[in-house]
Amino acid sequence: PFCFLCCVPYLSALQETEKILKRESKVSGSVTENDRDEGTSAGLSGRVGAEGDPEAAEGSYSALRAFVETSLDSYRHELAAILYPCFVHMYLELVYNGHRKHADAFIETFGPLQEEYFQEDIRQLMSVHRKDQIAESQLMQNFRSGQYTVRMCRDTYNSLKRFLQDKKNATIHNIVQENIYIDVYEGIARSRQQVDAVSGSTMGEASKQLNKAKVYYGLPKEPTIIVEEEDDGAGEDGDGRPKKKKAKKDSSLSKKTRADPNAPPSNRIPLPELRDADKLDRLNALKEAAKRIRLGAGNLPSICFYTLVNSHLQATAVEINDEATMMGVGLQDSRIKVFSVTPVKLKAMKSATELETIDREADDVLYRMMDERSASESKVLVGHQGPVTSLSFSPDKQFLLSGSEDGTIRLWSLLTWTNVVSYKGHVFPVWAVQFAPVGYYFVSCGHDRTARLWATDSYQPLRVFAGHYADVDCVQFHPNSNYVATGSTDRSVRLWDVLSGACVRHMTGHKSTIYALAFSSCGRFLCSAGGGGRILVWDVSTAHLLADLWSHTDTIHRLTFSREGSILTSGGMDCAVKLWDFTKLVSEFDLDEVASNSPTVRVATDGAHDGLLLSTYPTKSASILALHFTRRNVLMAAGSPV
């Protein structure tokens, strides 16, 4: 029979042995207790310790920097990634414990030694001097509530562990233990270029585990569209009624490619059914596509640029509809102006009384519904109570979506030119809105650090995408409408699954705020751009950074692809439109290397010498607010004088 009393001496001996082993190895609750296969993480305390010698802070951090600088060259670049989060947490601890003089001296000494892309955040830290100010600082709250992610190989991590096991480094050890998530991978250490390429985000690199989810980046097969065709012979039958029409497949859709194996199932998310008008529009688009010229290095597009004269910096958003027949302009004074960019004037629908007299069976019923007396070259929409920040036309040409600093999203009818719905989900300013390629759904983002998925017939958001640490400044629907990409002031890009609302991709590498996103026509690649004039190219299937394109001298606000995806176009505050050879860029990638832990990033600095930058078209003095390729691949651009 089992006797507990007999086991007591045995258990005591085990405990004594454990104490002796710990004394010999000089380890007491070290990071080694938290090793994991995919990475190493420690519990989050959520507060700053109340103890600690303020005089020792500078010495501890100096010892950490000395350790990093004297490490082997192969480890140094990955080890350097822990310098910034340790710096922030040590400053946070000094402020929390009321050591203002020591905190000021600490940040003045070590602040300038941090990377250039962290200097804006450090200036925010310098404005926090008291414990009560910590709660008011968004950056401080991010570091207190979240964990900074650092990726390093197993050998680099073992080198760090040996340093942390020294009792003299207890302060650094506690910070790493509680506030830093170390994502350990198997393989060789990354080079400086590879580490720098994915550095810069507010809360460190993206975790490998987060990017393992499967993404259906392919495009679904186009549905078969049936058109109606009248019978041969007389227009009426013997009873004087119009002859019935018989269904027929359109010849332009007879040649079909195989279904993409990476495409999502057709029933993965509920999609609106195609109306007759939608089918007709798709047929027209295919016919236009047959007439367009394929663009490339030897065949650049024609560009039509619209300058918003006399705007006096009032234009805050510009959008061109898919057919390139209308241009919407959002203004600082909360108004929206919609212009016709063709000879056809904009008209409003007739009143309900007049519509009752129209023959609904007439072939030109849509023409008869419009009031010729209301025809004009532009329309003005009034309803917002703050500057208009973003516009988006619906694919069916019936609605215009607008976001504003007043925190609302408004849906406008392009038939009656009135406000139909006001969506009030965001608490703070809305920075961007966009319709889904299939219509019906739209997405918004704003200052509240979230993006939201909506349906036009619902007052409440269907999904709330939360995870960014700062403002979400731009959004972009994937071409298959199953995913939404977001760019943020936290200098990271995220991809969200519309079905589950989960973040399936987290990509870091930007050194400043992200203002523009664009998916390639095939859906596999995502381009992002913003401050600093850099364009980053990502592989959505692996979440790896493929290329870093430098040429712009100021913030980039717009990105767009040509219709077949061969040319990437960018424009921004440097008053220039640039064309990039995306076909050449993609052809240089080694797919086997892309699938590795640390693929080589293609860096093109003013890529004219290697053929990636095809051409630059400067404007006289207008910043670029809109870029749009027509169905025949004519590039339309618009801007406002600066």
Image (cartoon, rainbow, N blue to C red):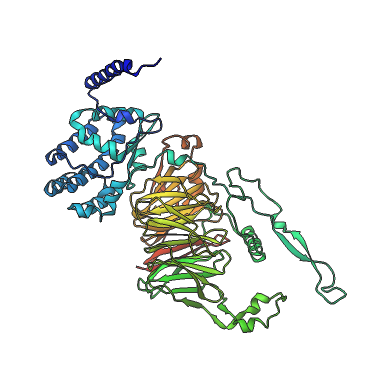
User: Which residue corresponds to the image point at 24% horizontal and 29% vertical from the top-left?
Assistant: 163
Residue 279 vertical placement versus 239 (above, below): above
- Image side of residue 296 versus residue 43, left or right: right
Give x and y (percent) for residue 178: 28, 38
- Front residue of 642/429: it is 429
Give x and y (percent) for residue 327: 49, 70
User: Which residue corresponds to the image point at 71% horizontal and 53% vertical from the top-left?
Assistant: 254
Can the viewer see residue 126?
Answer: no
- Displayed quadrant of residue 288: bottom right
- Front residue of 363/358: it is 358
Can the viewer see residue 194?
Answer: yes
- Image side of residue 227 versus residue 395, left or right: right
Give x and y (percent) for residue 477: 50, 55
- Front residue of 196/473: it is 473
User: Which residue corresponds to the image point at 51% horizontal and 78% vertical from the top-left?
Assistant: 377
Residue 123 vertical placement versus 350 (above, below): above
- Displayed quadrant of residue 406: bottom left
Give x and y (percent) for residue 70: 22, 30
- Image side of residue 56 versus residue 235, left or right: left
Q: Image quadrant for the C terminus?
A: bottom left
- Displayed quadrant of residue 307: bottom left
* Count of all numbered marks drawn on residues in the image: 0
Q: Image quadrant for the N terminus?
A: top left
